Amino acid sequence: MAKLPNQLPNQLPDLDPVVHGKMRLALLSLLSGVDEAEFTWLRDKTGSTDGNLGAHLLKLEEAGYVSVEKKFVARKPLTLYRMTEAGRGALERYIASLKELLGSALAG
Amino acid sequence: MDEDRGTAGGNAMNEQEIGERIALIESMMQAGRKTTEYWGWTFLLWGIAYLVAVAWSRFLQAGGPLLAWPVTMIFAALLTIGIARRRSRHKPQTEKSRGVEAIWTAMGCGIFVFAFPVAFSGHYQAQSFMAAIEVMLGIANVGSGIFLRWPAQIVVGVLWWAAAIASCFVSGNGVVYVFLAATFVCMIGFGIYLMIRESRDKARARGGVQVQHG
């Protein structure tokens, strides 16, 4: 596959590095379609390990893209994740940037 | 994690990478939305509950219709709540699932609010009673069919309405036959069709997307 034209770096959109990681991109995409999701559901959907998933969710949380709620249901801990408005905006901007990049790639 | 390395700035990506990311976004969004849409079992369960209630009220002397319908319906409602809670545990709720749940919960409550006072007030009249129940079932099916943009469920709702119209023009026994026919087609048949579709969907999803690490 051809690389995108390097001579046009200033005209190409920058991709948000927090969203760009494949796992975090998958997590934001999953959360964009649901009201809230449990840690275990996210783990099952992404096929990730607890440690790996926790690290990526922490990055998203620190960036303000997801919010976390921890509670107990029937004495069992339950961690719920929700996408924030900032997260939704970041994902939308990322998708728009990807489309722009793809357009440039095809044109180049 | 080193997956961030070398990705700052769009010009580090090629067409294939962009395509992969777009495919990942699409598949994950779809996976999230499709999570809680499996309700075929409820159609089957309620279809069987209706059949049990009809059989009990017509062929068993113990209790008769006065006991058969309330007992069967309350049991089916409790069973539905229990199974639904078990199945939806660990699964997220979507706007779509909340909307469909709202329609069916309102319909279920409506039937209970209507049926019990009519049955116990002494003003029960078979044709209009069954027609009202069938109209409510039609409303819920057409409502969620429109909401989900799903023609098959709209057709099921229209069949319930057709049964309601037919119920107004038949004899006492005819009302039961109309209701049984509608139950077989719109509940049991539709429920089995949904469950077959669901198992196919799940089989397809098992070979589905896993996020590649790194």
Image (cartoon, coloured by chain):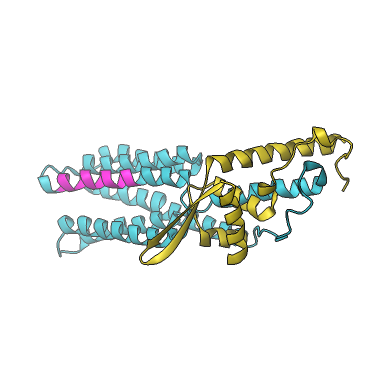
Please give the name of the residue rendered at 40% of the width and 49% of the height, measured from the top-left corner. B186
Chain B shade: cyan
Please give the name of the residue rendered at 61% of the width and 53% of the height, measured from the top-left corner. A59
Please give the name of the residue rendered at 47% of the width and 44% of the height, measured from the top-left corner. B96
Percent x, y for residue B76? Answer: 30, 58
Image quarter (top left, top right, bottom left or bottom right) of the N terminus of chain B: bottom right
* Residue B101 covered by magenta stretch: no
Front-most of residues B98 and B145:
B98
Front-most of residues B72 and A7:
A7
**Which span is picked out in magenta?**
B105-119
Image quarter (top left, top right, bottom left or bottom right) of the C terminus of chain B: bottom right
Percent x, y for residue B181? Answer: 35, 50
Residue B139 lies left or right of residue A13; in this view the side is left
* Residue B114 covered by magenta stretch: yes
Figure quadrant of residue B157: top left
Front-most of residues A61 and B149:
A61
Percent x, y for residue A64? Answer: 56, 46
